[in-house]
Amino acid sequence: MATIGDKVSPISVMLADANPLVLSAMSEIFERDPRFSLVATSATAEGFLGTVMRVPIQVGVIDWNLPALGGAKLIEVLREQANAPRLVVYADAIGDTARLAMAAGAAGFAPRSSPVESLLDTCRDVAEGKMVFPYLDVRELQKDPIEQLSRRERTMLEALSKGLTNRELSNELGITINTVKFHLSNLFEKLSVKNRAQAIAFYYSHRAKKGDFEPLE
């Protein structure tokens, strides 16, 4: 909660979930808690995006499978905005959802199976600038070089694995050749490789070890 003079201002929140029952239940929970001010709700990623681009929101709570963009793409778009809300993914704790949410740039993850207080506490902590991922071993995540790549770099690595030239990468990704070279340089540094062949070998080694990582485009 922000402090204005001697008055404590509630945390502004927006909720987005395609399930009307979940959205209604969450709305009631946040409206009852004086620490928060529920500004708006949406059933789609586009609706959420349209609102937070116009209205100052501190914390957004979103479903990972939010139509139609999806949680990962929504997070990616908002990462480019200067005053975007910090995002908490509220979803089922199955598979790699929490890890993928962190890799995409979310500030927190709250499993739907957890008590209501856990979601509220996560939003409070995120508003205070903390990262909240209770089901992840962050040390293990940081050991994997793939997880250090930006979405653009991961997309480029996947395209690179097809044997594309710089010009073909430029056409495929819709960026200039100089931008391709810039991203490749960063990519090689993060993977600790010296050239394209080594980067491609790393990519296929990673796939063999952990399985395909989820397509990003």
Image (tube, rainbow, N blue to C red):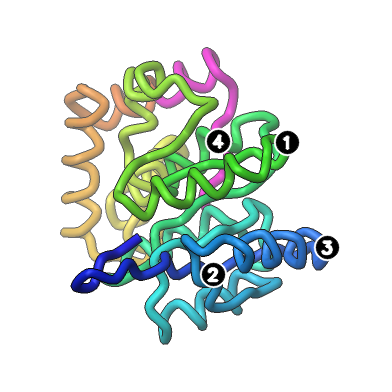
Q: Residue at x 17, y 50 (%)?
A: 182
**Residue 109 to residue 71: above or below:** above
Identify the residue position indicated by label 1 in the image.
113
Under circle 3, the secondary element is helix
Image coords of residue 39 (percent x, y): 53, 77
Q: Which is in the foreground here, disc 2 or disc 4?
A: 2
Q: Magenta part of the protein: which range?
A: 203-217
62 to the left or right of 168: right
Q: Residue at x 22, y 69 (%)?
A: 6
Identify the residue position indicated by label 4 in the image.
98
* Crowd around label 1: few <14 · some 14–19 · many ≥20 (10 Å): few
Q: In the displayed image of the protein, which residue is found farthest to the bottom?
A: 54
3 to the left or right of 164: left
**Residue 176 to residue 108: above or below:** below
Under circle 4, the secondary element is helix
Instruction: Report, in whole angstroms, how far the alpha carbon at label 2 lies from the one at label 3.
Output: 16 Å
Image coords of residue 113 (percent x, y): 73, 36
Identify the residue position indicated by label 3 in the image.
21
Q: Quadrant of residue 208?
A: top right
Is residue 155 visible to us here?
Answer: no
CB of mark 3 within 8 Å of CB of mark 1?
no
